[in-house]
Amino acid sequence: MTAAANGRLFETRNVSMHYGAYRALHDVSFHVADGEFVSIVGPNGAGKTTLVNVVTGLLKPTTGEVRFMDRDIAGVGPVELARRGMSRAFQLVNIFPALTVRETLAVAVASRLRRVANPFRSLWRDRELQADVERVAAAVGLAARLETQASTLSQGEKKLLDIASAFALNPSVILLDEPTSGVSTADKHSIMEVMVAAAKAAGVRAIVQVEHDMDLVARYSHRIVALQEGKVLADLPPDTFFSDPAMIAAVVGTRPPAMKRAP
């Protein structure tokens, strides 16, 4: 059965990751289907980042399978995986502070267009690349900041630029590692709204986020995958997840947030 047939864009099958005697992941199986927004949650040390590193090809699991679009991607690396249609935005902003917004996005677009030898040489005379840079910047509200040096952006704008760089690769699936960490409470929802709208406009078919902020998890998720001690504790829709106080206490140690879903 293919990914198109079963609706699954990617999945892990009984994935374990060992570092010597330490088991970071143990028989983790979960999937992401077309059209889903899936949040991965759990306490520190639960294995969330290890799982995302395995899913995005940075790590090859000790045992188990990782499949994207019904192809084995275990250990292929993030560059090859991006070419296949999955990209990642990191918890810590990975922009180049000396570059402008235009130049930062040009690097990502040039990579997708396989013009990586000298993207800056191509920048001004390559109409296709230029149009793509401007399209992506407009989608995340950075069109007016194209000539601005990245180091002078606000923290929220830096986050959007990092996410925009991932969008510039035209992914089918995007993975977000705490997309609003370090951003003020007042700005986090606006950033998420822009990001979700931009993803839809860009044709992104599924979003996976690692997130500690339960307000964001409750508002945007279709499913919540909870990890504890490297194992899947639950894989549930938000209403079911947040209606179980014992689950909340086991996973995040907080009371459930108000269930206000994104439109």
Image (tube, helix red, strand yellow):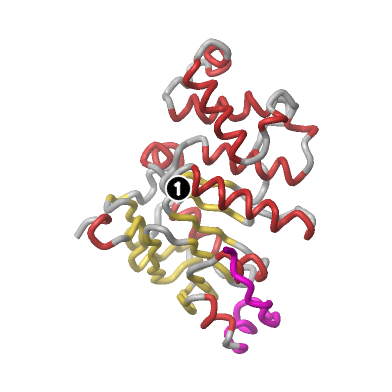
Q: Is residue 246 left or right of residue 132?
A: right
Magenta span covers which residues?
245-263
Residue 140, position as x, y percentages in the image: 62, 41
Secondary structure mainly formed by the magenta segment: loop
Which residue is nearer to you in this view: 191 or 158? Answer: 191
Query: Can you tell which quarter of the image residue 214 is in?
Result: bottom right
The answer to whether residue 79 is above or below residue 249 is above
Q: Which residue bears the numbered disc 1?
A: 204
Q: Is residue 183 left or right of residue 256?
A: right
The residue located at (47%, 67%) in the rendering is: 25
Query: Can you tell which quarter of the image residue 11 is in?
Result: bottom left
Q: Is residue 251 magenta?
A: yes
Crowding at mark 1 (Cα within 10 Å: few <14, some 14-19, many 20+) = many
Q: Quadrant of the N terminus?
A: bottom left
- Dot 1 falls on a residue whose secondary structure is loop
Amino acid carrying label 1: it is: Val
The residue located at (60%, 89%) in the rendering is: 246
Q: Is residue 107 magenta?
A: no
